[in-house]
Image (tube, helix red, strand yellow):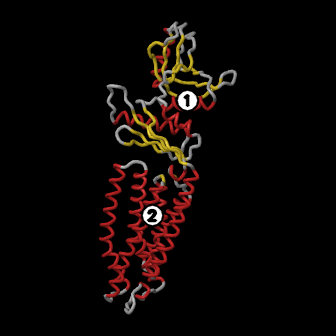
Amino acid sequence: MGSKLLMRLSLVIVVVIGAIWLSFFKPTKLGLDLKGGVYVVLEAVPDEGVTLDDAAMNRLIEVLDRRINGLGVAESVVQKAGSNRVIIELPGINNTEDAIKMIGKTALLEFKLENPDGTLGETLLTGGALKKADVSYDNLGRPQIQFEMNQEGAVKFAEITRNNIGKKLAITLDGKVQTAPMINSEIPSGNGVITGNYTVEEAKATATLLNAGALPVKAEIVETRTVGASLGDESIAQSKQAAIFAMILIGVFMIVFYKLPGIVANIALIIFGLITFGCLNFIDATLTLPGIAGLILSAGMAVDANVIIFERIKEELRLGNTIRNAIDAGFSKGFVAIFDSNLTTLIITVILFTFGTGPVKGFAVTLTIGTLASMFTAITITKILLLTFITVFNLNRPELFGVRGKTACK
């Protein structure tokens, strides 16, 4: 074996080892349709006379993302859909009702003076001045929300309490009074507590909302769907069965029609799967049912690329070329057709990813990675493995390539 081929084979081994590690030792993120969970669509509803622009939608998405992170939901998706909608996917979540309520709340915290007749005055301070909020407990062990103002908020809070000693300061959340303590003295620290007969869970949820911030624009829930985990497990099981059945059929077909190259193609197809899954895990992509469809489609493209190359090799052998020359010519002539077909696929995936949402983007991502992996395995890895086989085992008979009645030298 020449040093150049040995170096290429070593590269293949390194790639395979890396792909195996990423595929099996780094968990694959599963989407809503495979793991189960909640699907929510929010529609932004601006106040009358207010224009809803991209900046407001981006701020809305940021706040929603912080809220969901506060829920501790892994592999969640928050993305814009159209000009005024946001799609939220929460895989693996159990308490769906509380999650949906939390997502849709405006969570506008306001500080207002309470008038003697019980009405509230104008807003003096909002939750935008908060630095952080945490759950604490009073002397009786009841949960409450302890807050700390940022520097600007602390100055304003000190001014409010200094100028209104003896008055009640109402703290409201989305217009509902949570507590209205009497101001006994100036509070220069900017710290305080909100009491409201909370349960521990309610206090934690409220603190999470306050830390995430209020929604910059009112958002209404227009659609919710709950996907059971059992349905996701069933989809995974069916996909595995279909993949195994397809792999067996493809493997048999390749060996029957192409003999030695067919065996090499089957090995390359396994490497293709490892590389694809490894890349998906490397970029932390979420695997969905449309994504699985993209993987299957790209696997078919990998097989198709091998078929194109092997047919070119057989043509060269029928013309009387040597095994090595036939392999070089086959890969060289097949490259143009493979590159053109894959390039058009990649252009389509870019369009789908740019203008699509949710499942369409998942399909585009997996198909893009699968297409690139199929090109790499078909053009590079398959050739290296094929040359290794004929060099190491001295396999220089055309019959091993599915060509009969011809002889050739290595």
Give left or right: position of 336 versus 16: left
Q: Which x, y percent locates residue 34?
A: 53, 53
Q: Residue at x 45, y 73 (%)?
A: 9
Q: Which x, y percent locates residue 114?
A: 51, 11
**In the image, what residue type sits under mark 2?**
Ile
Q: Which x, y percent locates residue 252?
A: 49, 77
**How far is the residue under mark 1 from the one under mark 2?**
45 Å
**In the image, what residue type sits under mark 1?**
Ala
To which residue does mark 1 refer?
207
Q: Nearer the viewer, residue 353 or 267?
A: 353
Q: Which mark is residue 296?
A: 2
Which callout, 1 or 2, points to the residue nearer the camera?
A: 2
Q: Nearer the viewer, residue 22 or 215?
A: 215
Q: Residues within 10 Å of mark 2 (few under 14, many from 20)?
A: many
Where disc 2 sits, the SS reads helix
For residue 48, above or below residue 168: below
Q: Which x, y percent locates residue 244?
A: 53, 68
The reply to whether the C-beta atoms of the residues labelled 1 and 2 are less than 8 Å apart is no
Q: Which mark is residue 246?
A: none
Q: Nearer the viewer, residue 223 or 113?
A: 223
Quarter holding the N terminus is bottom left
